[in-house]
């Protein structure tokens, strides 16, 4: 079992920034891929950003150039720096990892962007 705890969400005006954190209950140094997803009201959960153990990153087209994913293996933490936020970024944000054939999700953190 792995617990993931997200934090850092909140209410921000359009154009503002937030930094989300996701802390894992175990070491992430051997976990190749970790990701951030989001789910807006009435919509399906969608991929936002992912990062490999080697530091390779990939992003959804809608956030490329505005969001930055990073990881600190020593702190068992993955971050999502969100800049130039838009109202359409409003959603619950979840972090995710897969290990031992199982997929784990955090409880989510709400991000609300006011226009």
Image (cartoon, helix red, strand yellow):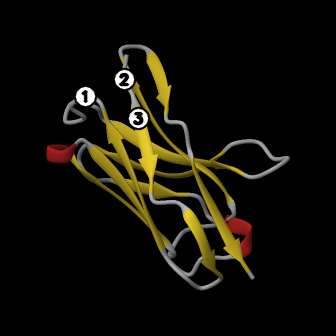
Marker count (numbered): 3
- State if disc 2 and disc 3 touch (CB < 8 Å): yes
Tell me what residue is drawn at x 60 percent, y 76 percent. 12
Residue 82 appearing in the image: no
User: Where on the picture, by quarter, is residue 64?
Assistant: bottom right
Q: For the residue labelled by badge 1, is the local secondary structure a helix, a strand or a loop?
A: loop
For label 1, the residue is: 26
Residue bearing mark 3: 4
The image's mark for residue 93 is none
Relative image position of residue 16 (x, y in whole percent): 55, 82
- Label 2–label 1 contact, CB within 8 A: yes
Secondary element under disc 3, as helix, strand or loop, is strand
Residue 7 in percent (x, y) is at 44, 52
Structural crowding at the residue carrying mark 1, measured as other residues with C-alpha within 10 Å and reported as few (<14), some (14–19) or many (≥20): few
User: What residue is shown at x 66% (from left), y 66% (from top)?
Assistant: 112
106 displayed left or right of 29: right
How crowded is the residue under tag 3: few (<14 C-alpha within 10 Å), some, or many (20+)?
Answer: many
Q: Residue 2 carries which label?
A: 2
Res 114 seen here: yes
Judging from the image, what secondary structure is the residue with disc 2 in? loop
- Is residue 46 shown left or right of residue 53? right
């Amino acid at each position: 079992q792995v617990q993931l705890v997200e934090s850092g969400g909140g209410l921000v005006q359009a154009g503002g920034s937030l930094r989300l954190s996701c802390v894992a209950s175990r070491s992430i140094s051997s976990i190749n891929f970790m990701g951030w997803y989001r789910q807006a009201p009435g919509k399906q959960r969608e991929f936002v950003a992912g990062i490999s153990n080697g530091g390779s990153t990939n992003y959804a087209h809608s956030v490329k150039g505005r969001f930055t994913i990073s990881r600190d293996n020593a702190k068992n933490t993955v971050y999502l720096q969100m800049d130039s936020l838009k109202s359409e970024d409003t959603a619950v944000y979840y972090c995710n990892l897969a290990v031992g054939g199982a997929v784990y999700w955090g409880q989510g953190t709400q991000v609300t962007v006011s226009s």
